Image (cartoon, rainbow, N blue to C red):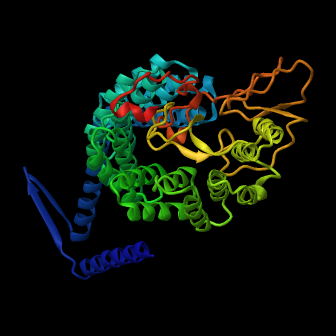
Amino acid sequence: MIRVVLFLIVVGVLALGEAWLADRPGDVVVTWQGFRIETSLMVMTAAAVAALVALLIVWSLVRAIVRSPTVLAKRQRERRGARAYAAISNGLIAVGSGDIDAARKLSADANRLAPGEPLTLLLSAQAAQLSGDRDGAERAFRAMASRPDTKALGLHGLFIEAHRRDDHESARSHAEEAAATAPTLGWAGRAVLEARCREGDWASALALLERHRGALDKASYRRQRAVLLTARALAAEESDHEAAKNDALEAVKLAPTLVPAVALAARLLAQGGYLRKANRIIDTAWRANPHPELAQSFAELRASESARDRLKRIDALAKRAPGNVEGALAVARAAIDAREFARARAALAPYLDAPTKRVALLMAALERAEGDEGRAREWLARAVHAAPDPAWTADGYVCDHWLPLSPVTGRLDAFEWRVPLTGMTSAAPVIESEKVLVIPAKPTAGPVVHEPHDGDPPLATNGAAPPLHPGLQPAQPKADPVIPLVHAPDDPGPEAEIVEDTEAEPDAKPSGWRKIFE
């Protein structure tokens, strides 16, 4: 609408000018080199306008001819850029969909059309990863790491590739370089932090966490600092009692429900005679998260008290989290020590229909304390096939005590209190063991169930996984070789590539910080 109005205004102005000239006629005489030209003003004006138009046309033609090489080159670059963009886009889609041949072909086209472009390098790296060409992927990531605009991405890719070939020194070097280049990179900070934790350098790890505090939300920072302080306190428990107590108390202040920190702080406070403070921090953690370590620490606060007094205290603790199995188990254990067998039996009664291993073992101890050896053996047999209890578990690794790092992946704060393999937080009823045999496979695979036959290998009684039935193999997770595009190359790929199936045998006499990995 505005253009129409402007056009009408211009036409009106021209018409007014023409009318003005027509109302004021006159003659124009031009004498030059013996030539004399006489004409009217209107004709002279029209001739001047025509000459100007002709001059503009000639100038446009000359300018187009002169600029034609540049214009043609620009249009060719635009067409080449459009083809490169299409190749990169379709190549990334092919990588995400797992089409190896298309990804490889489109990567070659992108390198031919737009060599050295950041997205071309990324496509080359992902296509190489998809096809299993680790050397090609590393070359692409190194090319990205040598450029300022893609250095962080290249270092991340090199870090992932180093992890995949178990080159932890190179992985740490790439992570430290990335952290120094861009301190806000979360993955780099975590990698360097976990590397220092693996070395037991807790002071350096805490200092690094402080430097990267701005990259973490408040809850994550408090949790990670609490875990590191707990690890340092465990390492210094014997060598520096006071420093260990201060670290443990600070960890409890940051994470009041962190069970290892609370148990350690309560133990150290009890050794110093601060029983009321120890009782208070255990009570706070127990209300939020009833845990057997808390019950054990609470029972050991007063070593000189009688078994009956200990039972009274444990009973009061259990009532602060009513209906929880951990409270019932703690009461039953204290009642057996106090020789109050009826009390112990009443505490365990609600859990006898589907007993877990610990419930069955406590019932066996109760029957043996009452002198019924036959019933005790029966409960021991049931314990072999009973549902598992929660345990400290990280990345499929089960440990009888908490560790600050996963022994499998080195991840900080990886251990969770849950039922191994299943990920459940509480035991559920199971099928009678006389009818089916549940054989746990690897942590990433589900249980294999088959009917027992004569000659089947006996079920292990030491808590280890029983041997497989002949002809049966545990289900192996089929890993997709492509890194998901959304996280590329953040996601290191299938966990099976970096998970170790074997655990290193601990030293016979650990010392210093290494004792916490016992």
Give the camera-side residue of 284 and 468: 284
Relative to residue 373, is residue 114 depicted above or below? above
Question: Which is nearer the eye, 425 or 80?
Answer: 425
Point 28% across, 64% down: residue: 46
Residue 492 at x, y percent in the picture: 50, 32
Q: Is residue 515 left or right of residue 478?
A: left
Viewer-side residue, 76 vs 372: 372
Q: Is residue 35 visible?
A: yes
The part of the image, by quadrant, that contains residue 394 is top right
Give the mark count: 0
Q: Quadrant of the N terminus?
A: bottom left
Asked if residue 58 can be seen in this view, the reply is no
Which image quadrant for residue 158?
Answer: top left
Residue found at the very far left of the displayed protein: 33
Q: Is residue 79 left or right of residue 452?
A: left
Is residue 427 or residue 371 the one in the foreground?
Answer: 371
Residue 188 in picture, x, y percent from top left: 36, 38
- Write the residue at 41% across / 55% down: 266
Task: Classify 466 as above or below 295.
Answer: above
Q: Residue at x 53, y 36 (%)?
A: 86
> Where's residue 185, x and y in %?
35, 44
The percent position of residue 2, horizontal first and vertical second, equals: 41, 75
